[in-house]
Amino acid sequence: MKEITIIRGDGIGPEIMTAAVNVINATGVSINWEYQDAGLTAIEKYKDPIPQQTLESVRRNKILFKGPLTTPIGSGFRSVNVALRKEFDLYVNFRPVRSFEGIQSIWHDVDLIIFRENTEEFYSGIEHYIDAAKSAAEAIGIITRFGSERILRYAFEYAKKFGRKKVTIVHKANILKYTSGLFLEVGQTIAKEYPGLEINDRIIDNMSMQLVMNPHQFDVVVTTNMFGDILSDLCSGLVGGLGLAPGANIGNEISMFEAVHGSAPDITGKNLANPAAVILAGAMMLRHIGENNAAERIESAVRKTIKAQKAVTKDLHPSSFVGTKEMAREIIANL
Ligand code: NAD
C-alpha cells in the first residue's frame, strides 16, 4: 500500500480534495492517505501554518497531494505554497495545458506544457520597506546559474524524452539584462546539447500576445518563476479556465501535486468548484508512482464527462450545471 500525504487545503480545498480522493479510490489503487494540516486550518489548530508533523509526513512519504492554500494579500503570513516548494526544493513546476472536447473555449487542440522555475527570483521572499515610513519598498529577485540550468535542462530532457519538437525560453532579458539575461544565456548554452530540438526564445510581453493570438505555435515553454505563474493562468484561460488546469511540483526526492488555481474564496462552500483540475493533478500523481492504468482511466473519465456536458460545474456550462459532488460522481461512473 502506498502512503501519500494529503493536505485538504483552504477555501474550496476540502470540497475538491474529497471529490479527488473519491475518484482515485474508485480506481482501486491501494493508497493510505495520511491527512495533515497546513495553511489556515493549521494556524487555527496549531498556530503554525506549516506544522512540524506535516513536514515530517511529507519527508517520510515523498509524495504530497495538496489542496489550495490561502495567502493573505498585502500583509500577514508568507505563502505556505511557496514555503513548501522551497522547503522540499521542488524546483520544477510542470503545468500541462490541453484542450477538452465539449468546452466552449477560444482555442481548440491546444497541447502545450509550461515548465516554471519554482524556487528562485521574486518568490524568494527577500522583500522589505526601505524605511519606517514605508515610503518605498524593494524586492530582490535572485536568479542563479545553478537554478536556471536545472529547470532548463529538465524541460529540454522532457521534450527529448517525450518527442516534443520545440522549446521556447521565455524571459525579459532586454530590460532585466542580468537576471533574465542569465536565464536566457544558460538556456542558449545548454540548447547546443540538444540538436534534435528547435529551441527559440520570446520576450514575456510578446509571448503573452502570441499565446492569445495563436497558441498552436508553441509546444514546450520554460521560464522563470513569476512569468511562469502568470502564463499558467493565461494558458488555462485558453482552454476553458482554471477549473481544468493541473500541476506538479517536482524535486529530486519529493513531489507535490495540486491544481494551478487557488482557494477561490468567492465560491467556497457552495458546491460550485470544478474538481477536474485537482482530479487531473491526482492522475499526474498516479502516473508518477507508476499507476499508469489508473491515471489513464481517470483522465479519460474526466474527458468523457466534460465532452458530454451533462454533469459539469457552472464554470464549464453556466446555463445547465451540477455541483462539485455530482460532477465527481459522474467521473466515477465514467471510470
Ligand atoms: P483563485 O485561483 O483561487 O481564483 C481565481 C478565479 O477562478 C475565481 O473567480 C475562482 O472562483 C475561480 N476558480 C478557481 N478555481 C476554480 C475551480 N476549481 N472551479 C471553478 N472556479 C474556480 O485565485 P485568487 O482568487 O486570486 O486567490 C485566492 C487565494 O488562493 C489567495 O489566497 C491566493 O494566494 C491563493 N492561491 C493559492 C494557490 C495554491 O494553493 N497553489 C494558487 C493560487 C492562488
Image (cartoon, rainbow, N blue to C red):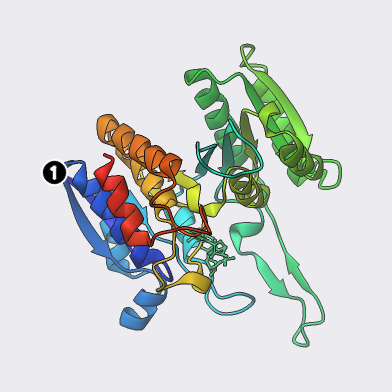
User: Does residue 45 appear anywhere in the picture?
Assistant: yes
For this view, does 17 lie left or right of residue 138?
Answer: left
User: Does residue 20 appear anywhere in the picture?
Assistant: no
Q: Label 1: how many residues lie within 10 Å, few (<14), some (14-19) or many (20+)?
A: few
Confirm or reject: label 1 Cβ below 8 Å from ligand 1: no
Please state which amino acid type lies under the numbered disc 1: Met
For this view, does 203 lie left or right of residue 235?
Answer: right
The answer to whether residue 256 is above or below residue 127 is above
Looking at the rendered structure, the secondary structure element under dot 1 is loop
User: Residue at coordinates 57% horizontally, 47% vertically from top-left?
Assistant: 240
Quadrant in the picture for the C terminus: top left
Q: Residue furthest top?
A: 196
Q: Quadrant of residue 127?
A: bottom right
Instruction: Work out whether residue 268 or residue 172 is closer to the camera in this orientation and state it.
Output: 268
User: Residue at coordinates 44% horizontally, 72% vertically from top-left?
Assistant: 268
User: Residue at coordinates 27% horizontally, 49% vertically from top-left?
Assistant: 23
For this view, does 92 lie left or right of residue 73?
Answer: left
Q: Quadrant of residue 283?
A: top left
Instruction: Work out whether residue 154 or residue 320 is closer to the camera in this orientation and state it.
Output: 320
**Where is residue 11 drawn, in percent x and y?**
43, 71
**Where is residue 170 drawn, in percent x and y?**
71, 38
**Where is residue 64 drawn, in percent x and y?**
33, 52
Quadrant in the picture for the N terminus: top left
The answer to whether residue 102 is above or below residue 322 is above
The answer to whether residue 321 is above or below residue 28 is below
Numbered label tally:
1
Residue under label 1, please give it: 1
User: Residue at coordinates 60% horizontally, 32% vertically from top-left?
Assistant: 152
Instruction: Work out whether residue 186 or residue 4 is closer to the camera in this orientation and state it.
Output: 4
**Where is residue 248 drawn, in percent x and y?**
44, 44
Q: Quadrant of residue 47?
A: bottom left
Q: Residue furthest bottom?
A: 133
